[in-house]
Image (cartoon, rainbow, N blue to C red):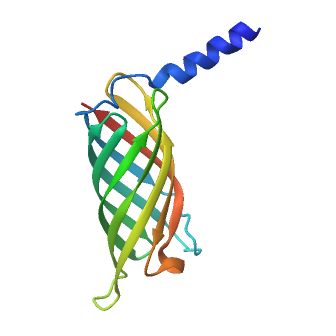
Amino acid sequence: MKKIIFTLLFAVISLGTFAQFEKRTMYVNASLTGFGLSYSKQPGFCMNIEAAGGYFFADNWAVKGLIGWDHVDAANTFDMGAGVRYYLRNNGLFFGTGFKYGLTSAGGDTDVLHNVFLPLEAGYCFFLNDHVSLEPSFFVDMCFNHFKESTKFGLKLSFGYYF
């Protein structure tokens, strides 16, 4: 019984042991969230779409850029930012951080917020083949200048392509 459990555990851990996290690899991903979680309760419909691209400048270390759109009720936020990701060797776990700038419009010309975020993210890469991955993650976007109104957290589902 111990041998079977050990073999299954080894098989699960080794699923992410591909060469995708090596130096000079590039990737693109698209993510979607819509769970409506935030530090302050915001009523109504919530959705976020984000596109990112990155480059592995060293083994397991990637630098990335991103753009995104966030919709909560009548407010729309357009984000852009940069960050880094670290992938734990041989298992697909990753951690990321960076800085994001968000421009929020609540429908009127005078209701525009300029926010700076510190995004934190932790997740896992499930590789579907040698290049395509499914990446569920937990994120926190801490807002520096409007913490209570604009800080968000939640679950994110991404699809990545490594080349």
* Residue under the point 28% across and 39% down: 56
Vertical order, 43 against 98 (above or below): below
Residue lying furthest front in this view?
58
Q: How many marks?
A: 0
**Left or right side of 123 for 54:** left
**Front in this rendered view, residue 103 or 87:** 87
Q: Position of residue 108 (x, y in %)?
A: 32, 87
Q: Position of residue 65 (x, y in %)?
A: 27, 54
Vertical order, 57 against 109 (above or below): above
* Residue under the point 35% across and 88% down: 111
> Could you tell me which quadrant the C terminus lies in?
top left
Q: Position of residue 18 (x, y in %)?
A: 38, 22
Q: Quadrant of residue 62?
A: top left
Vertical order, 19 against 104 (above or below): above
Residue lying furthest bottom in this view?
110
Q: Quadrant of residue 2?
A: top right
Q: Position of residue 29 (x, y in %)?
A: 32, 43
Residue lying furthest right in this view?
1
* Residue under the point 56% across and 74% down: 43
Task: Please indicate, yes or no, whether residue 139 appears anywhere in the rendered image.
Answer: yes
* Residue under the point 67% across and 14% down: 6
Task: Please indicate, yes or no, whether residue 35 appears anywhere in the rendered image.
Answer: no
> Could you tell me which quadrant the N terminus lies in?
top right
**Left or right side of 43 for 78:** left
**Front in this rendered view, residue 127 or 21:** 21
